Image (cartoon, rainbow, N blue to C red):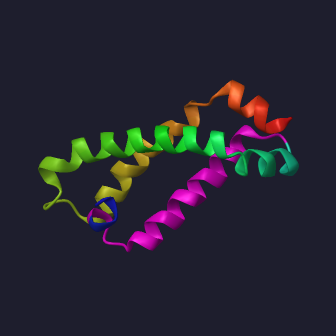
Amino acid sequence: MIHEILGISQNEYELRQLDQWFKWCSFKASTRIECQKLMVCQPLFNWWQKQYSKFEQDFLEEIRPYQHQVSPEDAERLLSYHLLKIHNYYSKPLILKALK
């Protein structure tokens, strides 16, 4: 549904999600090796994806009354506003587990 609001394919939206996952891991890691360890940790990814979905839902709730009136560019800005919040969240136990 979000990809339709943005005017992009489902595949492109999924690629954007993976890019956000990479950026999140890069932001939380000190080295390239740590980043790789974070990226392949399935429990951490599952946690991250759950948080990401919450921010997607926040976006959908806010845009719902306007979704047929808003431009894809404005929708993209609003989505970015919501999704950037994920960088303020982390699961310390899962990160430590991934870095072992």
Q: Position of residue 75 (x, y in %)?
A: 30, 57
Residue 11 is left or right of residue 61, and the answer is right
Residue situated in front as seen by the camera: 45 or 52: 45
Residue situated in front as seen by the camera: 3 or 68: 3
Q: Position of residue 76 (x, y in %)?
A: 36, 58
Which quadrant does the C terminus fall into? top right
Seen from this angle, which residue lies furthest front? 43
Which quadrant does the N terminus fall into? bottom left
Please state the extent of the stretch shown in magenta in the rendering: 5-30
User: Does the segment drawn in magenta span residue 13?
Assistant: yes
The residue under the point 13% across, 62% down is 68
The residue under the point 51% across, 57% down is 17
Q: Position of residue 81 (x, y in %)?
A: 41, 44
Q: Position of residue 20 (x, y in %)?
A: 57, 53
Residue 65 is left or right of residue 61, and the answer is left
User: Does the segment drawn in magenta span residue 84?
Assistant: no
The residue under the point 63% across, 28% down is 91
**Predominant SS of the magenta segment:** helix
Name the image quarter holding residue 98: top right
Task: Report the label total.
Answer: 0
Seen from this angle, which residue lies furthest top? 93
The residue under the point 61% across, 31% down is 90
Q: Is residue 13 above or below residue 55?
A: below
Q: Is residue 57 above or below residue 90?
A: below
Q: Is residue 32 above or below residue 50?
A: below
